[in-house]
Amino acid sequence: MSLESTLDNSHGTPSRARRVFCRRWIISGVILLFLVGAFLVWGPIGFGSGPLIVYVPSGGQIVGPRDQAWGTEVGIQAGKSGAVVDHVTVVGGGGYPGPRVLGIFVTRVRGAQCGGPFRWESPKRLLRDCNISSMHRLVGLRLPGNNPGVYMIIKTGPPVGPGGCWIMTTIVVHYHVGIRHYTLTSTGDFAVCKTQAESNEADRSLGLPD
């Protein structure tokens, strides 16, 4: 072998090694990008609020001075997603606290329902008076599809404090569909007060007409 041939081979070997090294890095990068993309598409992080819809009621109601629990119906649409609710937070607004949540349930709709807050009676009386089906704890339950749909029933304590009202402006629902987790934030303006004067003041605090 000539000296010239030996020198060519000595220069060519590192060049081939660099090419192999770069090729491996490119292949590894492509695989990593694919894995990241697959994780984002099929992984546990959901984009946006997901398929669930929650209808926060608007308006308000005067419940009087009775010191008892109340129930409020909130519409839900889950489509055919099979969503499972993990946690629900109810937020106040306008300087007023949110309702003191005692429990959150779900029921199917069977026609006419109780409108606005209703007195929380025994489960048997609720089923009869509000014309609803059996109630179940919402958290951890796989939601049925629409038609006729379901209602979230939030059991709350009475209004407390010097303002005489509680206000519901936001419901935040953490839920999952399969392994993907979502957070839905639904807003409205719903005030429950003991007296008409307190209700008017709550409306003003929310910027609503009396």
Image (spheres, rainbow, N blue to C red):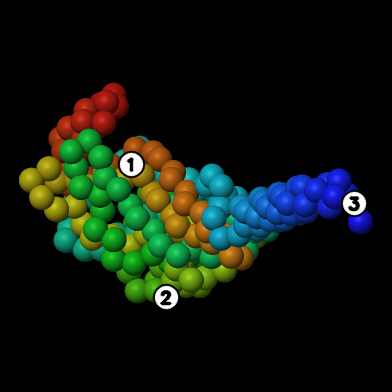
Amino acid carrying label 3: it is: Ser
Q: Which mark is residue 2?
A: 3
For label 1, count other residues whose C-alpha is less than 10 Å away and answer few (under 14), some (14-19) or many (20+).
many
* Eye-nearest disc, 1 or 3: 3
Q: Residue sitting at 25 percent across and 63 percent down? A: 69
In this view, the residue in front, 33 or 60, is: 33
Q: Residue at x 86, y 46 (%)?
A: 4
Disc ID at residue 124? 2
As measured in the structure, the alpha-carbon distance from the residue carrying label 1 to the one carrying label 3 is 87 Å
Please tell me whether mark 3 or mark 2 is closer to you in this view: 3
In the picture, which quadrant includes the N terminus? bottom right
SS for dot 1: strand
Label 2, label 1: how far apart the Cα atoms are: 30 Å
Q: Which residue is mark 1?
A: 169
Q: Is residue 173 left or right of residue 101?
A: right
Left or right of residue 5: residue 176: left
Q: Does residue 48 appear left or right of residue 168 in this picture?
A: right
Q: Earlier in the sequence, mark 1 or mark 3?
A: 3
* Residue 68 or residue 51, whichever sits in front: 51
The residue type indicated by label 2 comes to: Lys
Residue drawn at 73 percent across, 51 percent down: 14
Q: Give the residue drawn at x 40%, y 62%.
A: 87
Evaluate if marks 3 and 2 touch, with contact meaning CB atoms under 8 Å apart: no
**Is 47 placed above or below 71 here?**
above
Q: Is there any visible trace of residue 105 in the rendered image?
A: yes
Q: Residue furthest left?
A: 162
Mark drawn on residue 207: none
Q: How many other residues sit within 10 Å of disc 3, few (<14), some (14-19) or many (≥20)?
A: few
The percent position of residue 155, horizontal first and vertical second, equals 33, 62
